[in-house]
Image (spheres, rainbow, N blue to C red):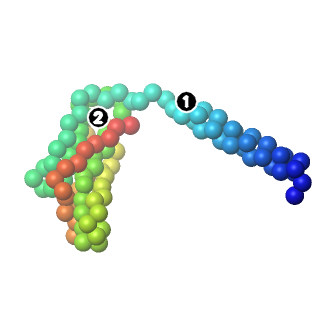
């Protein structure tokens, strides 16, 4: 392969990578501001589910709970609840044959 062809391929690859980086940066810059939520709280309930709720705001909350099972070979995984608007609880619970590890949390969007 001659040197001119090698340089041409390198130039095209560099241009492609630069485009990907710029477009990736634009997509991050184009993300809107985070939705504001009022005070949020969560905790493990006596039924083994993790419940999270936010008092007010325009965003949503989703609970998660840490679980294990025989099939997971000792690895921890998370089960997540559905997205819920402020004032409505999100509930995350381990499935049948799984057990919770006594902790969880929540995320907002």
Whether residue 9 is visible here, answered yes or no, is yes
- Give the image location of residue 104, x and y in percent: 23, 48
Q: Is residue 76 left or right of residue 23?
A: left
- Give the image location of residue 39, x and y in percent: 23, 29
Taking the view exactly as shown, the residue that stands out farthest to the bottom is: 71
Crowding near pointer 1: few (<14 within 10 Å), some, many (20+)? Answer: few
Give the quarter of the image for residue 95: bottom left
* Residue at left offset 65%, top offset 41%: 20
Residue 29 marker: 1
Whether residue 84 is visible here, answered yes or no, is no
Q: Are marks 2 and 1 in contact (CB under 8 Å)?
A: no
Depth order, front residue of 28/40: 28
Secondary structure of the residue carrying tag 2 is loop
* Residue at left offset 18%, top offset 56%: 101
Numbered circles on residues, count: 2
Q: Is residue 96 left or right of residue 28?
A: left
Q: Earlier in the sequence, mark 2 or mark 1?
A: 1
Crowding near pointer 2: few (<14 within 10 Å), some, many (20+)? Answer: many
* Residue at left offset 20%, top offset 36%: 41
Q: Is residue 80 above or below residue 96?
A: above
- Give the image location of residue 88, x and y in percent: 25, 40
Which residue has dot 2 on it?
A: 86
Residue 10 marker: none
Depth order, front residue of 94/91: 94
- Give the image location of residue 2, x and y in percent: 89, 54
Q: Quadrant of the C terminus?
A: top left
Point out the frontmost of discs 2 and 1.
Answer: 1
Taking the view exactly as shown, the residue that stands out farthest to the front is: 3
Give the quarter of the image for residue 48: bottom left
Secondary structure of the residue carrying tag 1 is helix
Q: Quadrant of the N terminus?
A: bottom right
């Amino acid at each position: 392969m001659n040197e001119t062809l090698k340089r041409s391929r390198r130039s095209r690859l560099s241009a492609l990578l630069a485009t990907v980086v710029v477009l990736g940066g634009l997509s991050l810059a184009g993300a809107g501001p985070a939705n504001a939520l009022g005070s949020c709280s969560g905790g493990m309930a006596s039924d083994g589910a993790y419940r999270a709720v936010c008092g007010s705001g325009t965003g949503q909350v989703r609970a998660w709970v840490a679980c294990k099972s025989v099939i997971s070979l000792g690895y921890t995984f998370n089960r997540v609840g559905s997205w819920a608007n402020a004032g409505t609880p999100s509930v995350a619970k381990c499935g049948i044959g799984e057990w919770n590890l006594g902790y969880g949390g929540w995320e907002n969007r």
